[in-house]
Each structure stands twice: as C-alpha cells, then as structure tokens.
Amino acid sequence: MENNAISISLGKNITFMHPAYFIITGLSGIPNIRHYYVFLFFVYIVSVLGNTLVMALIYLDPKLRTPKYVAVFNLAFVDLFGNTALVPKVLDIFLFNHPQIPYNDCLTFLFFCYTCLCMQSFNLVALSYDRLIAITYPLHYQVKVTHKFMLYLIASFWVFSIIAVLIAVGLITRLSICESVFVNSYFCDHGQIYRLSCNDHYPNYVLSWFYPVAFSWVPLLFILITYICIVCTLAKMATVHEGLKAFRTCIGHLSLVAVYYIPVLTTFTMMDKIHPNARILNLSLTSVFPPMLNPIVYVLQTQEIKESLKKLLNGKKPKSLEFLFP
C-alpha cells in the first residue's frame, strides 16, 4: 500500500484508510490502443454535435414542445453530459498519461458516470410509457401524459438515480483501501474499487448485484411489458394499415432500446468467455456508443425531428426566434 494513505477517523474506534489517489490501468498495455483513442475522440465529437442539435431543435421548434420531447430532450442532455464526464477524462488518463486520480476526484468521476448511465435507462422507460398511453389510450393521452406529469417523472428518476449512486459512493468511503491503488478499468469503477478494500465490503457486493437489476433489468422488463401491451392493442385494430401506422411511431424508441441494451446484454452474457482486455474495451464501448447513436437514430427515425431539421436547413426561422430576428 502507498505510504501517502490518508486515515479518516469516525468516532473513537473506527478508522478508515483512504489512499491519496487511485491509478486507472484498464486500457494500458493493449496493443494499438492509440487507434481506439482516436475513435473515442471521434465518438465524443459526434455525440456532442448530435445531442446538441437534438436539444436545439426541440427548444427552437414549438411543434416539438410536447411531453414526449421533454423526455427526448432530457435523454439528449444526459447523453451529452455523460459522454462529457467520461470521454475527456479517459483520454486524459490514457492518451496523455495521467493515470493518477485523487481519491475524492475518483469518487466524483464515479458518481457522474453512474448517474448518467442510470438516467439513460430510465429515459427509455419514460419514452416507453409515452408510447404505451399514446397507442392503448389515444383519447386520454393528453390527460394522462402532460408536461407536468413528464417533468415530475423525469425529476423523480433524477432524484432516485442521484440518491442510489450517492449511497454507493458513501459505502466506498467506509472502506479501507489497503490491497492496492490500481483500478483495472477505464474509469473509477465501483466494482473494481471495493475489491481493493481489506475490511468488510459485503454491502458494496450486494449493491454490485442489486444496481444492474434495478437500473437495467427492471427497466428492460417494464419496456418489454409495455410493448406486449402495445402489440396486443395493435392486433385489435380494424385494419393492418392502421396498426402499422401506429407501430411506426414506436420505431425510434425501439431503436434506442436496441442501441442501449443489446451491447450491454451481449457484453455481460459473454463476460467470462472473452479476454479481460476485450471485456474492458466492450464495456467502454457500451458506455460511449449509445450517446453517440441516440441522436442519429432519432433524427433518422422520427418524422417530427426530420421535419424540424429540414426547416432549419432550409433557412426557415423558428417562431421562438422571430422576436430576436424579425
């Protein structure tokens, strides 16, 4: 253990040993890894431009100011914020050879990355609920799904995610890190950090199993149930044409679900069958790839977004800016 470890005492009999810093090593030593850093930089630039564009279109076009696009706007914000919290730091650590992260900075890094990952999943839940009500209860949609309801739903997801991740961070602060300061991951990973402790980390172990269920499997189960209900409703429609027309409104959301969950499920299913380096690369891709693809998918698959983009490209001023540029 490093000599510059920090002792933090709580009360008279409890002392936790915290290192001054952690050393992130997950991507070090992988052959030709610099090409991957170039790819990460490209992914980040596309993510920033795409999500900023989606947020700008929703803000500027009055036709997109609906409850559904409140969730889409929040998803774009979370994707932009999440990749901004992760990718520049990963490049700084590995490309510019700054692997040492102070203890508190590492926990902050962990907090923002995990919070954004949780919110990405919950945003898909909000969008699936929107599609469920729109198709199964179309006459009651404007009553059941209002701006106020969607704002409260998104806010509750934020509060739940923040509190849950803060609990994980708080439990890490109660660990004495004495095994090592080397974290074999591409960021300050909760699972890698708690395994470095030499005192009881059973609560952290429980969380490492509970959080994937709460933030991935339960949302995915809810989404699957909503689409079972949607398919049952579409099957009862008078004509196939009406059913297909209604289902087309779900294509954008289904694409987002596939982009988010397929890489995650594939990686964790094959976790024990692939090389550790490949596992770390796959996990990093599941973190940065969906935020890049989400705005592309929505621009290509959502008619309202495409029409708004065409107006912008054709030089038509959004009404929200007419008072600035008459």
Image (spheres, rainbow, N blue to C red):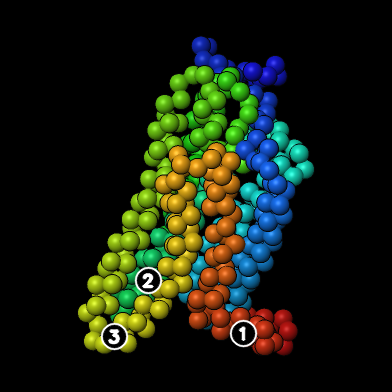
Q: Residue 163, which numbered label?
A: none
Which residue was labeled with disc 3?
Answer: 240
CA gap between label 1 and label 3 equals 30 Å
**Among the two numbered marks 2 and 3 on one chain, the one whose residue lies closer to the N terminus:** 2
Please state which amino acid type lies under the numbered disc 3: Val
Within 10 Å of disc 2 (Cα), the crowding (few <14, some 14-19, many 20+) is: many
CA gap between label 2 and label 1 equals 25 Å
In the image: residue 113, left or right of residue 146: right
Please state which amino acid type lies under the numbered disc 1: Lys
Within 10 Å of disc 3 (Cα), the crowding (few <14, some 14-19, many 20+) is: few
**Among the two numbered marks 1 and 3 on one chain, the one whose residue lies closer to the N terminus:** 3
Please state which amino acid type lies under the numbered disc 2: Arg
Q: Disc 1 vs disc 3: which is toward the camera? A: 3
Q: For residue 276, say whether it is visible.
A: yes
Dot 3: what SS?
Answer: helix
Dot 2: what SS?
Answer: helix
Residue at left offset 53%, top offset 11%: 12
Which residue was labeled with disc 1?
Answer: 310
Which residue was labeled with disc 2?
Answer: 131
State the image coordinates of residue 48 (x, y, percent, origin top left).
66, 62
**Among the two numbered marks 2 and 1 on one chain, the one whose residue lies closer to the N terminus:** 2
Foreground residue among 155 and 127? 127
Residue at left offset 27%, top offset 77%: 234
179 up-or-down from 106: above or below: above
Foreground residue among 138 and 280? 280
Residue at left offset 62%, top offset 41%: 186
243 up-or-down from 129: above or below: below
CA gap between label 2 and label 3 equals 19 Å
